[in-house]
Amino acid sequence: MTTLLEVRDLHASYGNAQALFGVSFDVREGEVVTLLGRNGMGRSTTVKCLFGLLPTTSGSMHFAGESTVGLPSHRIARMGLGLVPEGRQVFSNLSVEENLVATARLAKATGGMAKAGGQTSWGLDRVYGFFPRLKERRDNLGSQLSGGEQQMLAIGRALMTNPRILVLDEATEGLAPLIRAEIWQALTELKRDGLAQIVIDKNVGALMDFADRHYVLEKGKDVWNGTSAALRGETHIIHTYLGV
C-alpha cells in the first residue's frame, strides 16, 4: 500500500509557546487514520500545520513524495488534501450550491479519466447524489441550514476539491445522534470507495469500528500508535490518554 502522507518529527509553536514536540505519523492510500487525545493535546494544531495554516519550526511533511513545508494553503489543497474544519465554517451568506463550487477543483486525469478516491471525480451531481438533502436545499443560504446540513455541506465542499486525503476535524461534534449516524455512514462509504481519511473525533468507540490505525497525542507528542484491534486491548491507553 502506497504511503500518501508522511509526517516526521514535527515541531510547531504559537509565539513562544511550543505546541508540538516531534509528532510523526503516516497515511497510506485508502486508509483511515485517527489523531486521538484530549482537547489541547495537539490534534488540531497538527492539522493546521498540514494545511500551512501554522508554520512549523522543524520536521518534515511529504505528500505524494513532495515536501509541503512552507507551501501556502492553496498549494497544499491543490496537491490533494481536503479539509472539513472544526466548526464547519460554511459561508453563511452563500447558497449551498455557491458554497460547493466556491473552492471546487478538477481531479487530475488518470488513464484518460478523472479519478478521485478510486471513483469518478466529485462534482455537483455526485455530491448531490451522496447528500440528497443538499440538493433539496441547494438555493438556501448556509446560515439557513441545520447543524447536520451544515456538516454535510462542509464535507461536500471538501469533496468538491477532489482530495486524495480527506481531513475531518470533529466532524460529528454537537450533532444529534441520528445525524451523527448519517455522517459516520457517509464516511464509511467514502472509505469503501478508497478515499484516505484523517479523522479527529471524541467518539472513540465509533472510531475503533471505522478506522484502520490510530495515533494518540499527549501534550504535543505522539505517545502511542497501532491498529483498532491493538487499541481495544490497550485499556490503560484509552483511560489514561483519552479519558474514556
Image: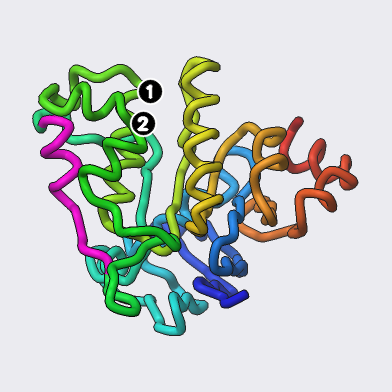
Q: Is residue 205 above or below residue 65?
A: above
Residue 107 placement, left or right of 92: right
**Residue of label 2:** 151
Q: Hey, which residue is sitting farthest front in the picture? A: 112
Secondary structure beneath dot 2 equals helix
In-front residue for pair 3/239: 3
Secondary structure beneath dot 1 equals helix
Cα–Cα span, label 2 and label 1 = 5 Å
Q: Residue 207: x and y, percent?
A: 65, 40
* Neighbour tally class for label 2: few under 14, some 14-19, many 20 plus, Cα within 10 Å: many
**Residue of label 1:** 148
Residue type of the residue flagged with mark 2: Gln
**102 inside magenta stretch:** yes
* Magenta region, residue range: 95-107
x 57%, y 77%: residue? 2
Q: Residue 119: x and y, percent?
A: 40, 59
x 47%, y 37%: residue? 186
Residue 137 placement, left or right of 129: left
